[in-house]
Image (spheres, grey):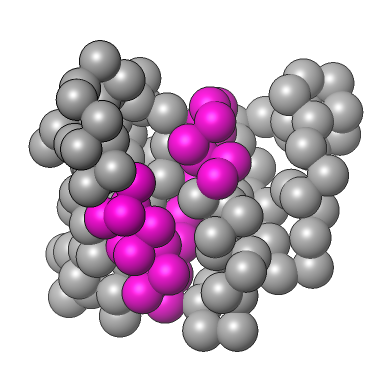
Amino acid sequence: MKFYVASGVSNAEKVNQAAAALEAGGHVRTYNWTTHGDVSKAPAERKREVASNESRGVAEAELVVLLLPGRFGTHAELGIALATAENKRILLWSESSAPFDGAEGFCVFYHHPAVERVVCPFEELLRLLQAI
């Protein structure tokens, strides 16, 4: 299965751990944005290239895993995943329920019917991903 892992740049290590758990099961990453990280200060052409690559990676994925907290890009990726939800499973993870119950960082799209909210310690998420 093809997958994409989205999150903020500060979570790049967790993104790669989640990707490794899926790759161990034979799944294939559609795009690894952690290799370039933050491109906010890059030239405009590079920003366009990265935006296109990340968009395509989300759209082509059959599984999109979003790790909270995320920033603007993570939420844009959630939107792309929802717009292409007919061909994918969308998992939205947080260590606490705060983003989902409105206590912290609420987003109504976290409650979209196509989104599976997962609240657990990160190690438990890795076990869940290894089982997919």
Quarter of the N terminus within the rendering: bottom left
Task: Determine whether 47 is above or below 49 in the image.
Answer: above
**Left or right for 80, reference 12:** right
Q: Residue at x 74, y 48 (%)?
A: 110
Determine the residue located farthest toward the left in the rendered image: 35
Residue 83 lies in quadrant: bottom right
Camera-side residue of 79 and 12 = 79
Magenta span includes 63: yes
Camera-side residue of 75 and 29 = 75
Determine the residue located farthest toward the front in the rendered image: 44
Task: Residue 112 in the image: state x and y as whole percent.
Answer: 79, 60
The residues colored magenta run 51-76
Tell me if residue 22 can be seen: no
**Left or right for 38, reference 81:** left
Task: Determine whether 34 is above or below 82 in the image.
Answer: above
Magenta span includes 69: yes
Camera-side residue of 99 and 43 = 43
Determine the residue located farthest toward the top in the rendered image: 41
Task: Residue 117 in the image: state x and y as whole percent.
Answer: 68, 53
Residue 90 lies in quadrant: bottom right
Determine the residue located farthest toward the right in the rendered image: 102
**Left or right for 48, reference 58:** left
Q: Tag count in the figure?
A: 0
Task: Residue 97 in the image: state x and y as whole percent.
Answer: 75, 33
Tell me if residue 118 can be seen: yes
Camera-side residue of 49 and 85 = 49
Q: Residue at x 31, y 20 (%)?
A: 40
Task: Determine whether 96 is above or below 92 in the image.
Answer: above
Quarter of the C terminus within the rendering: bottom left
Q: Residue at x 77, y 20 (%)?
A: 104
Task: Residue 44 in the image: state x and y as whole percent.
Answer: 26, 30
Q: Residue at x 50, y 50 (%)?
A: 77
